[in-house]
Amino acid sequence: MKPAHQIPVLQKAIQVLGAIAGGECEPAVRALSVGLKIAPATCYRIVQTFARAGWLRVDRDGRCELGAGLFPLLHRLQQTDILNPRLVDTLRELTETTGVTSKVSVRDGDDALTLLRVDSAEPMALTVRPGARFHLTLGASGAILLSALSNKEIARIIGRAPKECWQWQKPADVMRRVHDARQKGVVTDSGTYRPDIFGISAALCGPHNQVQGALTLTGLIHGHSKAQLDSFRSLLVRATSKLNQQAKLSAP
């Protein structure tokens, strides 16, 4: 979207809320102002506006945390298929069974946005914070989300991808993964996002079989054999198939 069609102060307010939620910097007005490069007076007014609405709570030391006023919004989100409580249970089961991190991603513009995750308890495991963004040309989850788009739109997204997306892969690798996603509903990526990381993603679909998100198992390649990754893939396919079937049965 062109900057002319955006509201600068609203963009800054979203940055503040996201930084507090994601723990990106010290959650006090001064630190937020410095970390986000927002004028102190503007940052203060943003925090006070959110606090008045109940979206933030500010303690006596000036530290901010998410407020109870966000609960009604979260409750509404939880009514959608992509935040169904069964999905959270599935993430926990997948991580407990495989020992690697599981997550759910949705498309947000040209990015895959991490919506939910359950981290592995292994000491050297890969972790992914909620709210993390990855370009759609990267990894298995991006391929699942791209698969729902037209080839013309995919070409447009590939064409404007930042150069760091091509450090370990080529556009042909992206299209190969998209083809796998369309044909099989599941994608395995070993090393094109980062050489030491694998990702296995399957499509989460709505009641009319439309792709709503990507369910992913991800971790460090070292220590995982091909046979293990194949078993993770089979487990993921079974889990998403069950969730997708439940989505169809629950449709009005």
Image (cartoon, grey):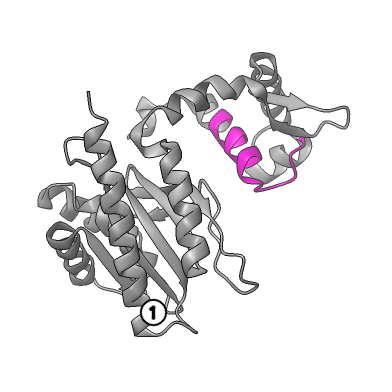
Q: Quick check: 31 left or right of 66?
A: right
Please tell me in which quadrant of the rendered image residue 69 appears. top right
In which quadrant will I find the C terminus?
top left
Quarter of the picture holding the N terminus: top left
| Residue at the extreme right of the image, as rendered | 60
Mark 1 Cα-neighbour bin, 10 Å: few <14, some 14–19, many ≥20:
few
Region in magenta:
13-28
Taking depth in this image into account, of 15 and 145 the one nearest to the observer is 145
In the image shown, does 183 or 58 lie closer to the viewer? 183
The part of the image, by quadrant, that contains residue 87 is top left
Residue drawn at (42%, 37%) of the image? 83
**Residue 104, position in %: x, y?**
41, 50
Relative vertical location of residue 30 with respect to residue 234 in this rendering, above or below: above
Residue 137 in view = no
**Which residue is at 66% across, 23% downward?**
68
Q: Say which of 32 and 238 sits in front.
A: 238
Q: Residue furthest top?
A: 52
Residue drawn at (56%, 59%) of the image:
119
* Majority SS type along the magenta span: helix
Residue 11 located left or right of residue 139: right
Identify the residue under disc 1: 228
Q: Give the image location of residue 156, x and y in percent.
A: 19, 51
Q: Which amino acid type corresponds to the residue marked 1 in the rendered image?
A: Gln
Can residue 161 be found in the magenta stretch? no
Q: Is residue 138 above or below residue 151?
A: below
Kindly indicate the quadrant of the structure image that contains residue 4. top left
Q: Is residue 17 magenta?
A: yes
Residue 7, x across and y down, in percent? 46, 24
